[in-house]
Image (cartoon, grey):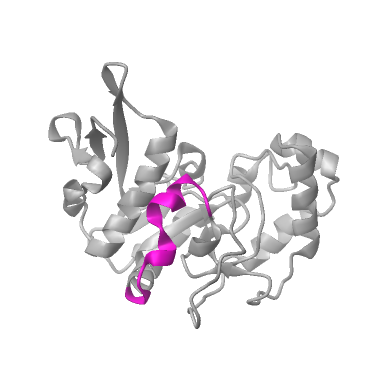
Amino acid sequence: MLFLLSPAKSLDYDSPLPPGLAHTLPQFPAQTRALIADLRTRSPQDIAALMSISDKLAALNVARYAAFSERFTQDNARQAVLAFHGDVYEGLQAASLSRADLRWAQEHLVILSGLYGVLRPLDWMQPYRLEMGTRLAGTHGANLYQFWGPRIAQYLNERLAQQAQPVVVNLASKEYFKAVDRQVLSARVVECVFEDFKDGRYKLISFYAKRARGLMARWAIEKRATRPGQLRDFDAEGYAYVPEASTPEHLIFRRRARP
C-alpha cells in the first residue's frame, strides 16, 4: 500500500537536520533537468504571470532555477519530507518521526511533484516552485500533466508490483492526483476525505483537510498500516470514521469540534 501526498509551496531549508540522516536521489533526473532548462529561459515577469505569483516570489524562483545543480549535495538539498513546510506537513511533523518511522515512510509514502514527478521522503530535493497545475507549454504539450504523461502511474505500478492486492491511498489534492493516469494505474485507489462541522453541517474545510491528510500519513507510519481496513481506526485530533457515509473506496472522517 502506498500513500500519496501533495507537496507544499512553503519550504524550510533553515531548520537543523538530524545528524547522519540517510538520503536518496529523485527518480526522474532527466525530466527534472528538462523542466529546469525550460524554466531558465523565462524572465521573472514570465514566471510571475505563469504562476500567478508576486514579482518578489518570481525573482526568488528564477534565482532557484539558475542555481539548480545536476549534483545534489547536503549544501544545496535536503530530504523532501523535511524540506516541505505547509499545512499537510504541519500535520505530518516529520522532524519528530524516529529513524525507523522514516525508513518505513520511505517504502510507503510518495510525494507528487511538478518538478520531480515523484519524491520519496528521503530523496534529496533542491528548492523550487512549480505546481502541477502550471500551464507550462512546450514540445511535450500544453501543461505538466502532458509532460509527465503515464510516468507517475507507471512508477507507482512498479513500486506495487510485488503486492498481491496493490492499493494507493490518495491523500493528495485533486490538482496533484490528476497527474496519476488512472487508465495506466493498476492499483485500487482509496480516497480519504476529512470533514469538519460548521454552520450546521459537515463540510470539507481546506485548511483542516490539508492538515488532516498529514495527520493520517503520520498515523499510518506510526501504526505501520498496510491494509485499507486499518485506516478506519484513524482518530487523530478528534476525527472519527463514519461508516454510513463511506464506501470501500471513499473513507469519510468527521469531527464535530476541533481540539
Q: Residue at x 43, y 59 (%)?
A: 110
Side of 209 where 86 appears, left or right:
right
- Residue at 59% across, 55% down: 11
Above or below 147: residue 156: below
Q: Position of residue 196 (x, y in %)?
A: 30, 30
Q: Position of residue 188 (x, y in %)?
A: 29, 49
**Residue 197 or residue 113, whichever sits in front:** 197
- Residue 187 seen anywhere in this rendered image of the structure: no
User: Magenta residues: mostly which secondary structure?
Assistant: helix
Quarter of the rendering occupied by the N terminus: bottom left
Q: Is residue 162 magenta?
A: no
Quarter of the rendering occupied by the C terminus: top left
Q: Residue at x 39, y 30 (%)?
A: 205
Residue at x-position 50% and y-position 83%: 20
Magenta residues span 85-100
| Residue positioned most to the front | 259
Closer to us: 81 or 255:
255
Camera-nearest residue between 204 and 28: 204
User: To which quarter of the image does residue 183 belong?
Assistant: top left
Percent across and percent down for residue 201 are 27, 19
Q: Give the answer, above or below, for where 101 lies relative to 47.
A: below
Residue 219 shows in this picture: yes
Query: Is residue 97 covered in magenta?
Result: yes
Name the outermost residue toward the bottom.
20
